[in-house]
Image: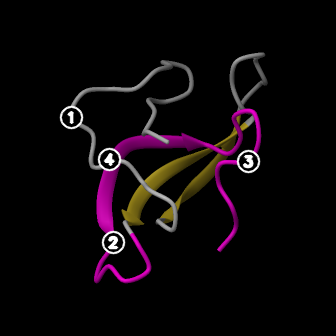
Amino acid sequence: MYWRNHPSKGGSFSSPPDWPRNGALLRGVIHEFPAKPESSLRWLEVKDYKPSASAAAFIPTPNCWMQFEQHGPLLHPA
């Protein structure tokens, strides 16, 4: 899954950090928006992420968002 813009802007953006892969840990703030057919109701405004459990430190992710669902769950509680 790739990083997204703020849900009101839509799409992805240029020069984001590396995409999160399976097993990445994301930290941020949960937001809820009015549901649209093409988007999720809940989004995570990601403040930083750790690429994998073995990574040493969290990496800042300014302006990065991730939806909780897209044809099924994308984010899972850790």
Rendered residue at 69%/34% (across/down): 70
Q: CA distance from mark 3 to mark 4?
A: 23 Å
Task: Tell me: 35 left or right of 56.
Answer: right
Earlier in the chain: of badge 3 and badge 1, it is 1
Q: What's under tag 1, amino acid-wise?
A: Ser
Task: Tell me: 19 left or right of 36.
Answer: left
Q: Residues within 10 Å of mark 2 (few under 14, many from 20)?
A: some
Rendered residue at 65%/74% (across/down): 78
42 w.r.t. 34: above or below: below
Q: Which mark lies nearer to you, 3 or 1?
A: 3
Q: Which of the numbered marks, if any, corresponds to residue 73?
A: 3
Q: Which of the numbered marks, if any, corresponds to residue 58?
A: 2
Q: Which of the numbered marks, if any, corresponds to residue 38?
A: none
Res 16 → quadrant: top left
Q: Indicate the secondary structure of the residue bearing disc 4.
A: strand
Q: What's under tag 2, amino acid-wise?
A: Phe
Q: Are marks 1 and 4 in contact (CB under 8 Å)?
A: no
Q: Are marks 3 and 4 in contact (CB under 8 Å)?
A: no
Where residue 22 appears, as percent x and y from the top left, is 51, 61
**Prevailing secondary structure of the magenta residues:** loop
Q: Which residue is mark 4?
A: 62
Q: CA distance from mark 1 to mark 2?
A: 18 Å
Q: What's under tag 4, amino acid-wise?
A: Pro
Where residue 42 appears, as percent x and y from the top left, is 71, 41
Earlier in the chain: of badge 3 and badge 4, it is 4
Rendered residue at 68%/45% (across/down): 68
Where residue 39 appears, as percent x and y from the top left, is 69, 25
Q: Indicate the secondary structure of the residue bearing disc 2.
A: loop
Q: What's under tag 3, amino acid-wise?
A: Pro
Q: Which mark lies nearer to you, 3 or 4?
A: 3
